[in-house]
Image: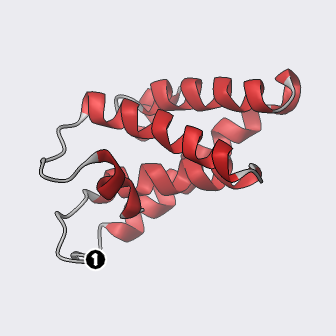
Amino acid sequence: MVKTQTNYPYFAELLYALQAFIRKVEKPFSIRLRDVKRAIKIFKFFKENFGKFNYVQNNSKIIPPETRSLVLALSLCYLFRLYDQSKHREYRKEMIYIIEKHQKIDKPQSRIEWSKDF
């Protein structure tokens, strides 16, 4: 469902990992299928709208609109429900690990620098 609706190969892997993270931090039944549907809708919205703009922030490499859309959609659905900053960092580490595994991000940017662009 996720892969066919988003046409983004690792969206499902990110959803699975981030839902497992939220289940670990919150209660196991705190994640629902409507969260997945919401994430897909928000991703599509951002993807359509970020595609209209090309910009560089702080002289850094341009992050593809699809990746930026993915991060923002999943953050809206999962990250912002966490109130503890240490949990935010853990969440971002998990997300960055999966994204970097599937997508080559030009070094010299380190993980920390790359994550600050979001």
Q: 49 or 117: which is nearer to us?
A: 117
Q: Element type at marker 1?
A: loop
Answer whether residue 105 is visible to the viewer in this image: yes
What residue appears at the point 74 percent right and 49 percent down from the top-left corner? 82
- Amino acid carrying mark 1 in the image: Phe
The image quarter containing residue 51 is: bottom left
Q: Which residue is mark 1?
A: 53
Instruction: Give the vertical position of 46 relative to 36 (above or below).
Output: below
Q: How is the image coloured?
A: secondary structure
How packed mark 1 is, by other alpha carbons closer than 10 Å (few <14, some 14-19, many 20 or more), is few
The answer to whether any part of residue 32 appears in the image is no
> Who is closer to the viewer here, 67 or 81?
81
Coordinates of residue 19 in the picture (x, y in percent) = 66, 29
Q: Residue 33: x percent and y percent?
A: 74, 31
* Point 24% across, 49% down: residue: 110
Left/right of residue 84 with respect to residue 79 in the rendered view: right
Looking at the rendered structure, the number of numbered marks drawn on it comes to: 1
